[in-house]
Image: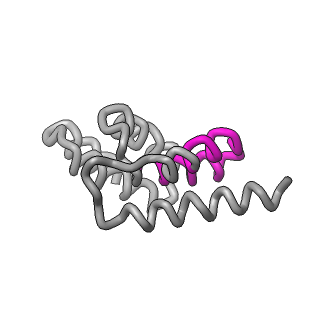
Amino acid sequence: LDAGIARSIQSHRDKETYKISAHMYFYSGMYDRAEPIYARLLAAFPEHLTSMAKLALIRLHHGDTNGARDLAERVIACHPRVRAPTDEENRAIAEKILEKLRART
């Protein structure tokens, strides 16, 4: 998995390659590998709700409740100029994270 993703990123440095690579790591449970790719996507595309939502989940998984809360709140507050079919799903993820964090306090 690692070698294939690394080759893909090296040869196709574009948004879709980074997204697919991050998702492959994320859904394989390899959060430490997915996190920097999502962070790079978010730096390049600050309104990318999927990167925000996935980073929030990763931060929550690692016990970074403040980081998870900040990103989840950004997902909800963000209204991208270009809408994506996954926007509502990402907002639902953010709401669930915030509910989980509220239940802990």
Q: Give the farthest residue toward the right.
A: 105
Q: Is residue 97 left or right of residue 16?
A: right
Q: Is residue 20 left or right of residue 88?
A: left
Please state the extent of the stretch shown in magenta in the rendering: 51-72
Q: Position of residue 81 (x, y in %)?
A: 28, 47
The answer to whether residue 90 is above or below residue 30 is below
Q: Position of residue 32 (x, y in %)?
A: 52, 43
Q: Nearer the viewer, residue 89 or 81?
A: 81
Q: Nearer the viewer, residue 66 or 4?
A: 66
The answer to whether residue 35 is above or below residue 50 is above
Residue at point 45%, 61% (across, down): 90
The answer to whether residue 57 is above or below residue 47 is below
Residue at point 42%, 66% (across, down): 88
Question: How is the protein colored in the picture?
Answer: one colour
Residue at point 77%, 57% (across, down): 102
Q: Nearer the viewer, residue 82 or 39?
A: 82
Q: Give the farthest residue toward the top.
A: 43
Q: Position of residue 61 (x, y in %)?
A: 64, 52
What quarter of the picture does the N terminus occupy?
bottom left
